[in-house]
Image (cartoon, rainbow, N blue to C red):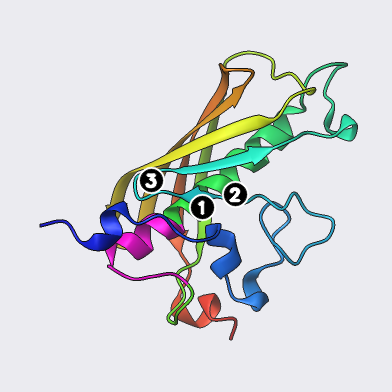
């Protein structure tokens, strides 16, 4: 029988549950004032994030720099991995021991140029959870068109690092 957490929507983005010591990531750290501040909202099966590129995220006029797309996929993928791991363990985020993931491998496929003048939507779904490893597949959408896909192989930090010690 599925646990209650299988369909439980988190009250806030997974990144909001990270301990302060681990909330400085350029992509998703809530305490990094110069970062992207990605926020991944978990609904029990997938996570969604939204991001509005700024003019300085330009590759060529009118289109987003590919490195930004990779960063968005990367950090949204690791956040999704954390949310999925908590759920798989039947735990609610925010309570020690903290689960924090980093990228072991990142694959990005650029399907079409991504326009810079709209909000981007990222959808991430875990496809495998095995031990300390979570594989997450991510889609990046702009104006209802899929512009990029990615696969993040995320690994869980050791507890001593995840708790900020």
Q: Please provide percent x and percent y for residue 21.
A: 66, 77
In the rendered view, tell whether residue 104 sits above or below residue 56: below
Q: Residue at x 85, y 17 (%)?
A: 60
Disc 1 element:
helix
Q: Tell me the residue that label 3 is attached to.
A: 135
Q: Residues within 10 Å of mark 1 (few under 14, many from 20)?
A: many
* Label 1 vs 3, first from the N-terminus: 1
Spatial CA span between label 1 and label 3: 9 Å
Q: Are marks 2 and 1 in contact (CB under 8 Å)?
A: yes
Q: Which residues are magenta?
A: 82-93
Q: Residue at x 49, y 74 (%)?
A: 94
In the rendered image, the residue lying farthest to the left is 1
* Label 3 vs 2, first from the N-terminus: 2
| Residue 84 drawn in magenta | yes
Q: Please provide percent x and percent y for residue 104.
A: 49, 51
Q: Tell me the residue that label 1 is attached to.
A: 78
Relative depth, front residue between 35 and 66: 35
Spatial CA span between label 3 and label 2: 13 Å
Q: Please provide percent x and percent y for residue 52.
A: 75, 35
Spatial CA span between label 2 and label 1: 5 Å
In the rendered view, tell whether residue 14 sits above or below residue 112: below
Q: Residues within 10 Å of mark 2 (few under 14, many from 20)?
A: many
- Residue 75 circle label: 2
Is residue 110 shown to the viewer in this render? no
Q: Residue at x 88, y 16 (%)?
A: 61
Q: Residues within 10 Å of mark 3 (few under 14, many from 20)?
A: many
In the rendered view, tell whether residue 11 sits above or below residue 115: below
Q: Residue at x 73, y 55 (%)?
A: 26
Q: Is residue 156 left or right of residue 143?
A: left
- Residue 53 circle label: none
């Amino acid at each position: 029988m599925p646990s209650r957490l299988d369909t439980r929507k988190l009250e806030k983005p997974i990144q909001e549950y990270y301990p302060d010591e681990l909330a400085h990531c350029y992509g998703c750290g809530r305490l990094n004032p110069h970062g992207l501040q990605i926020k991944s909202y978990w609904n029990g099966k997938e996570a969604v994030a939204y991001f509005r590129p700024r003019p300085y995220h330009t590759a060529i006029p009118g289109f987003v720099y590919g490195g930004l797309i990779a960063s968005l996929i990367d950090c949204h993928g690791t956040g999704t991995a954390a949310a999925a791991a908590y759920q798989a363990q039947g735990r609610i985020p925010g309570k020690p021991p903290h689960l924090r993931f980093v990228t072991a491998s990142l694959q990005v496929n650029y399907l079409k140029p991504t326009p810079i003048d709209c909000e981007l939507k990222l959808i991430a779904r875990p496809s495998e959870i095995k031990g300390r490893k979570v594989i997450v597949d991510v889609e990046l959408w702009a104006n209802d068109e899929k512009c990029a896909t990615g696969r993040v192989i995320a690994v869980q930090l050791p507890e001593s690092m995840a708790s900020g010690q």
